[in-house]
Image: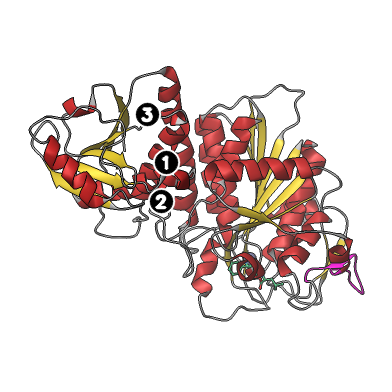
Amino acid sequence: MKIKIETSSPDKKKTSMLCGFVVEGSDKILGLDRIDSEIAPFVKQSIIDMGGKFGKISVIPVKSPAQRILLAGIGKKEQFTKDTFRYVSGKIAQKARELKLREFSIICPPSSESTSTVSQIVEGCKLSLYKFEKYRSEKDNSMPDLFIISPKSDKIINTIKTAETVSDGAIFTKSIANLPPNECTPSTLANFARDMAKKNKMKCTVISKDELKKRGFGGITAVGQGSKNDPKLIILEHNRGKTSEKPIVLVGKAVTFDTGGISLKPGEKMDEMKFDKCGGCTVLGIMKAVSELKLPINVVGIVPSVENMPGGESYRPGDIIKLYSGKTAEILNTDAEGRLILADALSFGEKHYAPKAIIDFATLTGACIVALGTNVAGMVSNNDKLKQQMLESSRNTTEEIWELPLNDDYMDMIKSDVADMKNVGIGRAAGTITAAAFLRNAIKDTPWVHMDIAGVAWTQVATKDKPYNPKGATGFGVRLILDYLQNI
Ligand code: BES
Ligand code: MN
Ligand code: ZN
């Protein structure tokens, strides 16, 4: 979808649909001061009739210059959030597609916070029109263009551009995360990373099975050994900060399919474990946007990728393996595989890059869905400042997170009788935290946050319906971390 800024006054704009926001109970469209006197009473009555309730959409036919006016309710002013315009713009864009329009125009409301509003409009429209159609014979290729009606300024133009790039990052994440497991293996993901690096001047390194083994990545090689699709460790480096500046390291779990391995999962909904690569896809989407935005910082993306399969060569419950950190882990459940590959990647990231901060994303535990549901991600951290920065970006983007505690009592819950630790906790108690405790052992004292995105990475039955999260992968974390990276 092409997005352009339109500086003519809204009542003059020739467009197939002129869209405006209506506050609940008001009789005006925000930013539309003048209107053809002939249709004014009719439009005014329609505004009063539709009421401006949040999310309500009403389309009225008018005569030129616009062919239709779309009224979009945004609710009461006191109840606005940083999601209001994203959500409602998504509804508008989907209406435009339903009507098969080639373009539509949104009147940007005049407000002090207009850059946030503009970003929300762009993100809402772009993300809501994304559809995963790669495998359909009959595709809906219609993609309307968008005019944002607003006075021109460099600030607005840059805001639109940035929001487009951020949205494209999230869309990239969705589109690779949605790929089926037969078409997306660890080496497929490695190829996506290589392509992206070539296009956007990043450094890409892919470490393959033999070298992983040689260099002591015991977690990645153990989990990967049961599949004929070999494990890969994918590393992307974006270096546009000072050479002396420590990087931010992003780590993402990419299990391209999680059967559970020898501790096989039940069949029900096992297909959804194609989404067990979402953390890694989030990191790739962030790196794509970071490099396209040419952010003047150093960022490293590390994606350990494996397929967790049962078979004659699989790792087993009872095995004791040695992680990249040098610590040993007793395997008690081969379905607790994510923490093993992440531990290797976290230790490697800390040792190799001495980063300022490490942030990891992982569809790590079903327990996180039990604790927080499917609209809020779980956060565990060892650093107050980094945690606060995450919460701030969460407020800015409305990608919601909630902190869970991690103290020494939880660390004790993963002590093993025979090794340095075991890969499960005690029964079902605090499953999300004991998984995080395992990760905590992989790093020394670098500021770290872990995001358990098991509930939010794709739309599940209990997921709140939002136009910008169509069925499938959500790209959770891309907007969140890009907000954080733009603010540091
Ligand atoms: N990928 C799963 C976690 C998961 C399950 C995410 C369902 C989203 C929906 C992870 O590898 C896993 O299987 N975790 C186990 C850990 C347990 C064996 C300690 C789980 O949550 O049951
Ligand atoms: Mn698993
Ligand atoms: Zn998993």
Q: Label 3: which residue?
A: 110
Q: Label 1: which residue?
A: 123
Local SS, label 1: helix
Q: In this rendering, would 106 be left or right of 347?
A: left
Q: Earlier in the sequence, mark 3 or mark 1?
A: 3
Q: Is mark 2 within 8 Å of ligand 1?
A: no
Q: Quadrant of the N terminus?
A: top left
Quarter of the image where one finds residue 243: top right
Name the main secondary structure of what is drawn in magenta. Answer: loop
Q: CA distance from mark 3 to mark 1?
A: 18 Å
Q: Label 2: which residue?
A: 468
Q: CA distance from mark 2 to mark 3?
A: 23 Å
Q: Earlier in the sequence, mark 2 or mark 1?
A: 1
Q: In this rendering, would 219 be left or right of 471?
A: right
Q: x and y percent of residue 471 in the render?
A: 41, 61
Quarter of the image where one finds residue 227: bottom right
Residue in the foreground of this view, choosing between 334 and 464: 464
Query: Where are the magenta residues, as a range?
Result: 413-424
Quarter of the image where one finds residue 143: top left
Please state which amino acid type lies under the numbered disc 3.
Pro
> Looking at the image, do the residues carrying marks 2 and 1 touch, with CB atoms under 8 Å apart?
yes
